[in-house]
Image: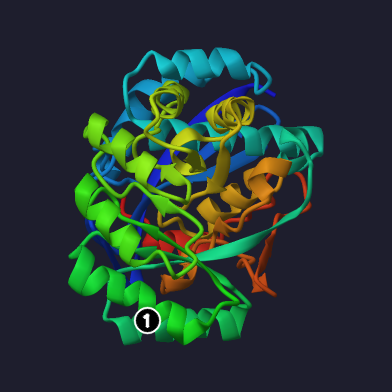
């Protein structure tokens, strides 16, 4: 089970419509497919979605760091040497999605080699998760229409609403329109992507106090240390840390510092190895977890549900697992299907992901 080859393949697939939010917008999924091959001929895969406005990574940068640094550090190691692999990757600062995709591809190869699914290897709590859909910036009526379509077509009843534009004239009006249009049977929470100040966040959340929101996420900048602590004291719902918790040390800082009361795990930025560390840390600290979305394609979403369904704590809440529906196409030969508001993890060895070679040839950029 020794690693013999690591590949980083850039590809680009357009979205049907751009996803807009406070810190940026995405028109095309310019991602990287990471493949790990072993001496037994097993091939593990994962997806790296660069987000330069969040982590500073680009598609070209991910390919470069994997080709020139990470591949040489892991080739020759056994798939079971996961701590050695983690230690070697950690020598390089930053590059979270590049490290995470490589980590998850190795787990995929390990599961295939041992005959177990990644979910079973991680914990095996269940095989599915309820799905939350992320709604990007648009006019209130358009966002209500999208939510209704997701509910009626896929059975999705949990929605994360992007806010962070103008907190009083527009953002609160959007959330109110969603509550009035969808009724009380759906779950709503808001994500500011650091777009408001602490005082704007407090006022906006007070204005939405009658809407029954479940969470608020990253409403104000992570470096507003005192403002975030003050904001947490004003809220009557958990404040989710997302962009501010890229590492387990960040989780400790935000929770013990009083700047967050819940954590978003994104396998795209912490892989399976570090996501497991974050899970155990959050479990010990007694904070809630949600599975977040890095505007992943189907392969990235498959990784998220594989991890989220492995543990009781992460499977309690709906995971953000549906934004691949906004893409015009994808790489998987057997596309993911959402039924009854749930996404099921693949039951075969590894992740159960098979890449369609014709689609990869069509969309690859190298």
x then y, percent, for residue 82:
61, 19
Which residue is depicted at the point 59% across and 73% down? 156
On the picture, is 79 further left or further right than 236? Answer: right
- Quick one: 318 or 322, which is closer to the camera? 318
On the picture, is 63 further left or further right than 186? Answer: left
Is residue 6 among what the camera can see?
A: yes
In the rendered picture of this protein, how many numbered marks are placed on residues? 1
On the picture, is 297 further left or further right than 67? Answer: right
x then y, percent, for residue 194:
25, 48
Return the residue at label 1. Answer: 177
x then y, percent, for residue 199:
21, 49
Which residue is depicted at the point 54% across and 48% down? 291
Where residue 152 sits, quadrant-wise, is bottom right
x then y, percent, for residue 62:
32, 37
Characterize the local packing of mark 1: few (<14), some (14-19) or many (20 or more) Cα atoms within 10 angstroms. some
Is residue 23 among what the camera can see?
A: no
Which residue is depicted at the point 22% across and 63% down? 167
- Quick one: 183 or 317, which is closer to the camera? 183
Question: SS at mark 1?
Answer: helix
């Amino acid at each position: 089970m020794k690693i013999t080859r690591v590949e980083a393949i850039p590809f680009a697939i357009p979205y049907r419509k751009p996803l807009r939010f406070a810190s940026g917008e995405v028109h095309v999924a310019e991602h990287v497919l990471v493949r790990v091959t072993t001496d037994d001929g097993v091939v593990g895969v994962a997806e790296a979605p660069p987000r330069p406005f969040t982590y500073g990574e680009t598609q070209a940068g991910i390919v470069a760091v994997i080709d020139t640094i990470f591949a040489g550090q892991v080739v020759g190691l056994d798939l079971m040497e996961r701590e050695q692999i983690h230690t070697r990757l950690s020598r390089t600062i930053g590059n979270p999605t590049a490290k995470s995709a490589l980590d998850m591809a190795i787990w995929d190869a390990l599961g295939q080699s041992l005959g177990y699914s990644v979910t079973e290897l991680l914990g095996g709590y269940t095989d599915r998760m309820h799905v939350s859909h992320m709604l990007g910036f648009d006019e209130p009526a358009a966002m209500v229409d999208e939510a209704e379509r997701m509910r009626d077509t896929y059975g999705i009843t949990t929605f994360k609403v992007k806010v962070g534009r103008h907190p009083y004239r527009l953002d609160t009006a959007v959330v109110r329109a969603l509550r009035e249009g969808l009724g009380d049977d759906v779950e709503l929470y808001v994500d500011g992507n650091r777009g408001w100040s602490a005082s704007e966040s407090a006022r906006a959340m007070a204005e939405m106090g009658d809407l029954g929101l479940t969470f608020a996420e990253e409403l104000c900048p992570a470096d507003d240390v005192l403002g975030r602590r003050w904001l947490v004291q004003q809220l009557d719902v958990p404040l989710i840390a997302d962009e501010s918790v890229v590492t387990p040390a960040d989780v400790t800082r935000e929770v013990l510092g009083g700047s967050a009361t819940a954590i978003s795990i994104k396998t795209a930025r912490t892989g399976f190895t570090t996501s497991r560390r974050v899970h155990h840390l959050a479990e010990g600290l007694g904070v809630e977890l949600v599975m977040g979305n890095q505007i992943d394609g189907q392969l990235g979403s498959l990784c998220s549900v594989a991890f989220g369904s492995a543990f009781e704590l992460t499977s309690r809440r709906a995971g953000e697992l549906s934004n691949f529906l906004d893409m015009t196409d994808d790489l998987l030969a057997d596309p993911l299907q959402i039924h009854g508001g749930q996404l099921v993890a693949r039951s075969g060895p590894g992740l159960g992901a098979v890449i369609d070679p014709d689609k990869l040839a069509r969309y690859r950029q190298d």
